[in-house]
Image: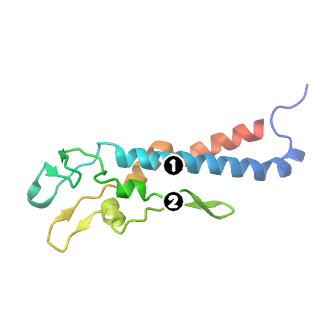
């Protein structure tokens, strides 16, 4: 009766390909979840004067909770994952206000922008380390 799973002699051959596949699938899952989080109506809004309803530039009136989409520029600015080294990828948002939307802050006018950390909520939902480990295990076990 033979042993199940990857045998030690096979690990050196299978491991690099399995890691790359697991990494790519995990990054793709996070990329999709980032977009879902931006579009989800889960974000609180405590704006200037405590207004709970605001008019967006797109003409919609939004209350609380709300999504982070107005004209869609933030959502559309999300880059495709770029592999920056053997084991890392970069996804970024290329609008100049992405940091204040994500991290919150005080405006020059005195208003306050609440933090809407969509990358953190995406990470909480995807659980990338566990997701990666499951794919790696699947790839190595065949």
Sequence-earlier tag: 1 or 2: 1
**Residue 97 shown left or right of residue 137 in the figure:** left
**Residue 79 shown left or right of residue 98 in the figure:** right
Q: Residue at position x 37%, y 58% from top?
A: 74
Crowd class of label 2 (few under 14; some 14 to 19; many from 20; radius 10 Å): some
Q: Secondary structure at mark 2?
A: loop
In this view, the residue in front, 70 or 119, is 70
The circle drawn on residue 120 is none
- Can you name the residue that lies furthest to the left here? 49
For residue 135, above or below residue 88 = above
User: On the image, which quarter does residue 131 sit in?
Assistant: top right
**Residue 23 shown left or right of residue 9 in the figure:** left
The residue that label 2 is drawn on is: 91
Q: Secondary structure at mark 1?
A: helix
Question: How far, Cα to Cα, is label 1 from label 2?
Answer: 9 Å
For residue 112, above or below residue 130 = below
Cβ–Cβ under 8 Å for marks 1 and 2 = yes
- Can you name the residue that lies furthest to the top here? 1
Q: Residue at position x 55%, y 48% from top?
A: 128
In this view, the residue in front, 71 or 25, is 71
- Can you name the residue that lies furthest to the front here? 59
Image quadrant occupied by the N terminus = top right
Q: How is the rendered protein coloured?
A: rainbow
Q: Give coordinates of residue 73: x percent, y percent.
A: 36, 58
**Residue 117 shown left or right of residue 84 in the figure:** left
User: On the image, which quarter does residue 4 sit in?
Assistant: top right
Q: Give coordinates of residue 111: x percent, y percent.
A: 15, 66
The circle drawn on residue 30 is 1
Q: Give coordinates of residue 53: x percent, y percent.
A: 13, 48
Q: Give coordinates of residue 123: x percent, y percent.
A: 47, 49
Image quadrant occupied by the C terminus = top right
């Amino acid at each position: 009766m033979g042993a199940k799973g990857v045998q030690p002699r096979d690990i050196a051959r299978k491991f690099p390909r399995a890691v790359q596949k697991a990494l790519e699938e995990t990054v793709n899952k996070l990329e999709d979840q980032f977009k879902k989080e931006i579009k989800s109506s889960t974000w609180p809004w405590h704006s200037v004067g405590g207004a709970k309803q605001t008019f967006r530039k797109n003409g919609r009136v939004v209350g609380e909770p709300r999504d982070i989409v107005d004209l869609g520029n933030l959502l559309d600015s999300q880059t495709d994952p770029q592999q920056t080294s053997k084991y890392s990828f970069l996804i970024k948002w290329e609008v100049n206000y992405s940091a204040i939307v994500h991290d919150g802050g005080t405006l020059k006018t005195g208003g306050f922008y609440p933090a809407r950390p969509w990358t953190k909520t995406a990470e909480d939902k995807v659980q990338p380390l566990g997701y990666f480990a499951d794919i790696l295990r699947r790839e190595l076990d065949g």
